Amino acid sequence: MNFGKVTDFEKVTTTDLGELSNIFTRHYDSLINEISDAAQQLAVRRLIEENLIIEGNRVPLPDKVIALKHGISSELLKKLVDSRLLRAEPNNVDGFSYEISHDTLVEPIMVSYKVRFEKERTEKERIEKLLEKRKRQRKIITILSVVALVSIIFGVFRIIIWQKEKKLQVKSETEIFDKVIQEQNFNWRGYINMLDKDNNLSYEGQKILKEIDNIDLSNNALLRIQKGIIECENLKSLNLGGNGLISLPAEIGNLTKLTSLDLRQNRLTSLPDEIGNLMNLTFLDLGDNQITDIQAVSKLENLEILNLWRNPITSLPLEIAQFKNLKVLYLSYFPKLKTPAENITEFIKAVPKKVQLSESKYKNEDNSILLIYVYPIAEEWKTLPNVEVVK
């Protein structure tokens, strides 16, 4: 073995390493991406990028403010501290204040923020353009309707206009549905092109839809559920959040293999009884609608997470309190509900396991506990024997 002097080392320069700020930015992004929950990823980014940096300077925030305003748990904050992204210092209100761990991270974090801001701006513009296109279509049809009112063929003309509007909307929604299916199976040629001579879905089309188990049609300004969705009989996850749905078809009850159904941020005022057929559901998000009666949900005994956020619900069915697997129930801002406090008291009493009430905690993995996320917490609930108030 030769231990002589080695003279053929290559010189490593800063060019070989790349920009140091880029390395820090990638490191920051990788730490954020380690958070499995997408909503929590965004919450952490907004906390760090928009609240812990002001005019290019690090600023601390108390843990109580972070929990109430940003919904970030102490467990997640600890992980961020352990990863050296944040640091915690005791404050004068018996808690901790959190700030970015070092000045060198400020610039890389702001680079990441600018990238995220541009993506969100682009997505917002896309949705606004889509809604503006629909608005122009409806405006044209409305103008035609006004002209038709002064004509002797008022009735016939009005029907024609209505049919055109419906066709335009159905065509647009079908195109959106087709795009989602084509992303999963390139053999899908579009719903219309997959029909047979009797106008029924062909054998090939049925076979393709049977293979689909996940559909995400969120934020597409949909007004109705496409027939093709109902024909995906093996569907397990369906996301229709952020649309303009006014009602659900009874046929949604045919999707009996669904385990996750997201209907948040629509215009739903009621639920069909057939939704009670979805006995395999473990996740149901009804947040941000106008639903008053959720009796149909009382049959979904396998639910683990139920979100009733921002709905004028008049009563919580006590059957839901008996769900053995229910771990999280979101009620959010209590005065927005139409549910009497007494009804919630009876609901809590009916829960056969420990109940945690929280104004900030939103996650629970313990099947022996039901976490109810509600704000504010009424004093009468705090004194119930099976209740623990947590932060």
Image (cartoon, helix red, strand yellow):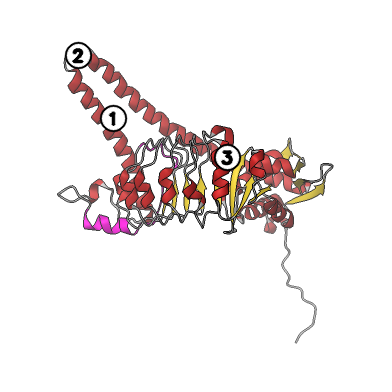
Task: Say what amino acid the circle numbered 2 marks.
Answer: Ser
Q: Nearer the viewer, mark 3 or mark 2?
A: 3
Task: Indicate which disc, 3 or 1, sits on the residue closer to the N terminus.
Answer: 1
| Crowd band around label 3 with a 10 angstrom C-alpha radius: few (<14), some (14–19), many (20+) | many
Q: Quadrant of the N terminus?
A: bottom right
Where is mark 1, residue-wise? 165
Task: Count the marks.
Answer: 3
Q: Please, is residue 230 above or below residue 292 in the view?
A: below
| Crowd band around label 2 with a 10 angstrom C-alpha radius: few (<14), some (14–19), many (20+) | few
- Residue 146 in the image: state x and y as whole percent: 28, 16
Can residue 102 be found in the magenta stretch?
Answer: no
Can residue 215 be found in the magenta stretch?
Answer: yes
Q: Please, is residue 194 above or below residue 46 in the view?
A: below
The boundaries of the magenta stretch are 202-223
* CA–CA distance in space, label 1 to label 2: 20 Å
Describe residue 371's horizontal placement relative to residue 299 as left or right. Answer: right
Where is mark 2, residue-wise? 151
Q: Nearer the viewer, mark 3 or mark 1?
A: 3
Describe residue 204's horizontal placement relative to residue 368 as left or right. Answer: left
Where is mark 3, residue-wise? 332
- Residue 144 in the image: state x and y as whole percent: 27, 20
What's the mark number on residue 331? Answer: none
Using the rendered view, name the quadrant where residue 15 is placed: bottom right
| Callout 1 secondary element | helix
- Residue nearest the observer in this picture, 35 or 329: 329
- Residue 383 in the image: state x and y as whole percent: 67, 45
Residue at 18 percent of width and 47 percent of height? 199
